[in-house]
Amino acid sequence: MQKKKIIKRVILMLVLVVLGYGVNYCRKSFPIISGYGAKNMCSAVFVAHRNEKEVREQELGFGMIKLLGKYEVNYTDSSVTGSVFGFAKCKAIYRKGLGATLIGEMPEEELRKQHFILAQVPNINPDTIDWPMGDRLKDSFPTQVNKAKLQEAINNIFKEADTTKPIRTRAVIVLYDGKLIAEQYAQGFTKNTKLLGWSMTKSVTSALMGVLVRDGKLNINNPAPVPEWHDVQDPRHIITLKNLLQQSSGLDFEENYAKSCDATIMLFKKADMGAYTASRPLKYKPDSVFYYSSGNSNILSRVIRQTVGDNGYHKLAYDSLFYKLGMYSAVLEPDESGTFVGSSYMYATARDWARFGLLYLNKGMYNNQRILTEDWVEQSVIPAKASEKREYGFQFWLNAGEKNDVTKREYPSAPTDTYYADGYEGQRVFVIPSKKLVVVRLGLTQHKNFNSDAFIGAVVNAVEK
């Protein structure tokens, strides 16, 4: 009898533990599931003008997002509401010129009343202007590149070897010596389709920092002008902008998308993402440990806003960068506070992502204008002191290889001078100066089965001289 009582108590305890875990999981994860789906559906439908059904099947067709989430599109007020079993409702709204913003801590009415001074898109027809400022291409092909090899490399990454785990390449662009020599799209996508760069946005944030450094408005070697760290007694006071650029801030910030963590809380729950990250305590001495953090990037975006002020901030990226490069499709999306989510949320066409890469291939020059200093571009690809594998610069990933063995690098099939903007689900903008190449690959690879090294290696091998 006593034994049965013990067994019942053990079972009851196990049930309570399981229930407790389940409740805690639901409390933390349901808002993330709702928010992720609402935000991405809103951007895909109203920014990229994608088909709602296709977005449900592809962008939202995986894991708990598909299994538990429900997402309703409202075409009247340009919004999407996500929920899980009717609970944890999250709403994202679209605003012209700003893209989609997820509502978390701010009343919707207050968010919709926000007014920002936005840039005016130049009234031009890109089809009547030569590349790269426009979309008119010259019918020529460089003799230094093997056209057949290049086309084969591109064709291969549009093939689906396993349809149960598709790699879904959607767009590929190859530039050689500044000229667009190859371009291909999946069915339903064109040169006018805006595609999400995810963390490639970090590299754009770095370029905007470079614009302010060029103009003498910021010094990256000084303590970062973050209000929360102003007190000289605060151990975070010594964090520099360079530390933030190189992902070596030392802040206690967890980036793990397999669970609820700092990164997901920031992206899907916080009104001011930069302020949230700036509030985090110090975990390591600045410049001593490399740790990739979207929070660092959003602090940088907030610093840019505070430096420029609201009279110019929402125009800066467009007037000082995008429109000077002919990137007329680009859309940066803000958080609720109005600060651009510099870690993750930028849409642009494949051609415009290629234009961004071309700026760096040209060492900061574009259309006979100095956009970034040559020194800034050179600094951007110097490995961070704290990155033991020498894999990171100023919000760009590097292919330099380890200090004592350069064969140990992310892309062994590409030259060591290769560097790249890298985004979730296989977004890439490769810049390879020694081969005069810029290579863009955009897609929706959710199973980590895209062999990007084989692809970039095949493209490099097509350059024969």
Image (cartoon, helix red, strand yellow):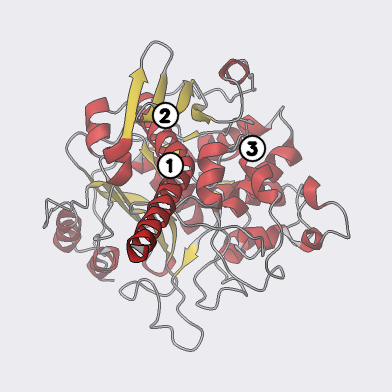
The image quadrant where one finds the N terminus is bottom left
- Residue 458 position, x and y percent, is 23, 67
**Residue tagged by mark 3?**
272
**Residue tagged by mark 1?**
26
Q: Please, which residue is most extreme toward the right here?
A: 232
- Residue 428 position, x and y percent, is 37, 54
Q: Nearer the viewer, mark 2 or mark 3?
A: 2
Specify the label residue 87 is tagged with: 2
The image quadrant where one finds the C terminus is bottom left
Query: Which amino acid type corresponds to the residue marked 3 in the rendered image?
Result: Asp
Query: Which amino acid type corresponds to the residue marked 2 in the rendered image?
Result: Phe
Going from N to C along the chain, the mark reached first, 2 or 3, is 2
For the residues bearing labels 1 and 3, Cβ distance under 8 angstroms? no
Q: CA distance from mark 1 to mark 3?
A: 24 Å
Q: CA distance from mark 2 to mark 1?
A: 10 Å
The answer to whether 435 appears left or right of 295 in the picture is left
Question: Residue at coordinates 54% horizontally, 44% vertically from top-left?
Answer: 265
For the residues bearing labels 2 and 1, Cβ distance under 8 angstroms? yes
Q: CA distance from mark 2 to mark 3?
A: 24 Å
- Is 258 above or below relative to 208? below
Q: Please, which residue is most extreme toward the front here?
A: 1
Q: Nearer the viewer, residue 83 or 193?
A: 83
How many numbered discs, if any?
A: 3
Query: Which amino acid type corresponds to the residue marked 1 in the rendered image?
Result: Cys
